């Protein structure tokens, strides 16, 4: 064989060996640093030392620009708590409302960037209640923002709304004896479309999504177009009845780890507050909320289409891993099981007391166990901060985030030195302009009461509304 041919063959073999060696080294490094080729053991810096993380996302980095439309009575508070904790762990800015809007973006007014607190501008995450306005959100959020929301079966949702807002929504309040049956017998006798808080009494999901809650259900073209618009904007519409399966899809969409999806259910009613529905009531509820029913049926179907595309057996395994990880989380935080659910009046720590809509409805919360001061100190225990925030209600957590982000804002802006003012000439005529004042945003009744229960702060200066 000619010498030249031998040299070429030797060089080719050497290149193959070098390539295989590089692949081996790269694979080892990938597994070591959490490249997620398989389930890995990357520790969690807030105390998840005993939990395993997962991602089926290959080499994709976690997506951190998220707009979650928080709908009413749909398990959305649980999702919000999950997003709040993720944002804190990853040092992300969460858009929060100005104080005049309380903990919601001046709901039920249509969302505007004017409702966002100046200390939380240029956010990566937004998740507080609002009436959806895509054009305004596009002005506020990064271009790669992923939009998600959650829906609930209209029958159970409307029963919850009727109980929860019975003392605020006049359409419900004027019904004799607070009877859901009486309302559904003659809904137009009690319902006023343009009345305050009327959005809780009909097609609440449609209203939250920015739609016309009073559009006739016979207008099939409107319904089809509205559903199509929601489908175009939102990358994922979760379903409350299939919460864990929805989280599997969310995890894949955002390329998050298993540990990022852990949660504790929030904002639940005492079982005695729930009404049993007669045989004919579900059909009446769905008819009265025909637009919400159409939304739910469409997106429940599309959710299962996506789950089947992912593989139901694979989804089942991920749900099992998620639930197992949550058991370990509870063990690490509370020594075996969740703290007992209690009515707000019996919760010692006021930072863990959920807002109560009325004396007739008990919204349950969690009280820390007597050994709470020792949380996070034992071997394998979770951090005290994580354990407390898992249980923290929406109003208190929103206030805590605003305080921490305001401190960060002030620190970053304290380094900026304004230019010196120009001297004013003695003979110059200066005109003093009055500050522009805007009317205070109209808040829903329950938002006003939430501020009072959680410890209100003074009204924000008018300049925050500009």
Image (spheres, rainbow, N blue to C red):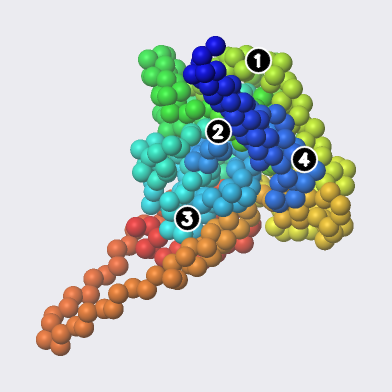
State the residue position of label 2. 60
Alpha carbon distance from label 3 to label 2: 27 Å
> Which sits earlier in the primary sequence, circle 2 or circle 1?
2
State the residue position of label 4. 51
Alpha carbon distance from label 3 to label 1: 40 Å
Tell me, yes or no, whether the two marked residues, 3 and 1, touch with CB atoms within 8 Å: no
Expressed as whole percent of the image width and height from the top left, the position of residue 450 reads 60, 53
Alpha carbon distance from label 4 to label 3: 32 Å
Which residue in the rendered view is the most extreme toward the bottom?
426
Q: Secondary structure at mark 4?
A: loop
Discs 4/2, front? 2
Mark 1 crowd level (few <14, some 14–19, many ≥20, 10 Å Cα)? few
Q: Secondary structure at mark 3?
A: helix
Discs 4/3, front? 4
State the residue position of label 1. 311
Q: Quadrant of the N terminus?
A: top right
Discs 2/1, front? 2
Tell me, yes or no, whether the two marked residues, 4 and 1, touch with CB atoms within 8 Å: no
Q: What is the quadrant of residue 429 in the picture?
A: bottom left
Vertical relation: 132 (above or below) 3? below
Visible residue check, residue 304: no
Residue under the point 58% across and 56% down: 401
Q: Secondary structure at mark 1?
A: loop
Tell me, yes or no, whether the two marked residues, 2 and 1, touch with CB atoms within 8 Å: no
Question: In the displayed structure, does residue 56 sit left or right of residue 346?
Answer: left
Expressed as whole percent of the image width and height from the top left, the position of residue 328 reads 82, 39
Say the numbered circle drawn on residue 120: 3
Alpha carbon distance from label 4 to label 2: 21 Å
């Amino acid at each position: 064989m000619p010498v030249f041919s031998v040299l070429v063959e030797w060089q080719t073999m050497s290149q193959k060996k070098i390539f295989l060696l590089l692949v081996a080294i790269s694979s080892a490094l990938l597994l070591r640093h959490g490249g997620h080729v398989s389930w890995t053991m990357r520790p969690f810096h807030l105390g998840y030392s005993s939990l395993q993380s997962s991602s089926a996302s290959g080499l994709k980095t976690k997506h951190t620009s998220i707009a979650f439309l928080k709908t009413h009575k749909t398990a959305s508070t649980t999702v919000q708590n999950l997003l709040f904790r993720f944002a804190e762990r990853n040092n992300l800015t969460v858009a929060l409302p100005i104080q005049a809007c309380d903990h919601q973006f001046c709901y039920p007014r249509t969302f505007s960037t004017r409702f966002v607190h100046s200390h939380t501008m240029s956010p990566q995450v937004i998740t507080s209640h609002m009436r959806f306005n895509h054009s305004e959100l596009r002005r506020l959020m990064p271009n790669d923002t992923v939009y998600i929301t959650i829906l609930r079966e209209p029958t159970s949702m409307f029963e919850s709304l009727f109980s929860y807002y019975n003392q605020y929504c006049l359409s419900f309040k004027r019904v004799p004896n607070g009877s859901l049956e009486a309302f559904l017998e003659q809904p137009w006798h009690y319902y006023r479309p343009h009345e305050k808080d009327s959005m809780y009494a009909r097609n609440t999901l449609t209203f939250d999504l920015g739609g016309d809650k009073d559009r006739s259900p016979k207008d099939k073209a409107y319904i089809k177009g509205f559903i199509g618009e929601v489908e175009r904007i939102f990358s994922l519409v979760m379903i409350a009845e299939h919460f864990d399966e929805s989280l599997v899809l969310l995890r894949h969409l955002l390329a998050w780890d298993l540990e990022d999806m852990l949660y504790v259910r929030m904002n639940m009613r005492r079982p005695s507050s729930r009404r049993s529905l007669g045989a004919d009531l579900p059909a009446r509820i769905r008819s009265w909320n025909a637009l919400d029913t159409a939304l739910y049926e469409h997106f429940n179907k599309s959710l299962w289409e996506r789950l089947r595309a992912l593989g139901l057996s694979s989804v089942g395994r991920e749900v099992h891993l998620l639930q197992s990880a949550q058991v370990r989380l509870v063990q690490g935080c509370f020594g075996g099981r969740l703290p007992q659910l209690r009515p707000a009046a019996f919760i010692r720590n006021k930072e863990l007391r959920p807002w109560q809509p009325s004396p007739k409805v008990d919204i349950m919360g969690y009280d820390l166990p007597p050994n709470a001061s020792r949380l996070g100190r034992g071997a394998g225990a979770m951090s005290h901060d994580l354990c407390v925030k898992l249980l923290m209600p929406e109003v208190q957590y929103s206030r805590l985030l605003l305080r921490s982000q305001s401190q960060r804002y002030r620190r970053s802006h304290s380094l900026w030195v304004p230019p010196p003012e120009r001297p004013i000439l003695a003979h110059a005529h200066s005109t003093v302009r009055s500050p522009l004042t805007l009317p205070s945003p109209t808040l829903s009744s329950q938002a006003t009461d939430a501020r009072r229960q959680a410890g209100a702060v003074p009204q924000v200066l008018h300049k925050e509304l500009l």
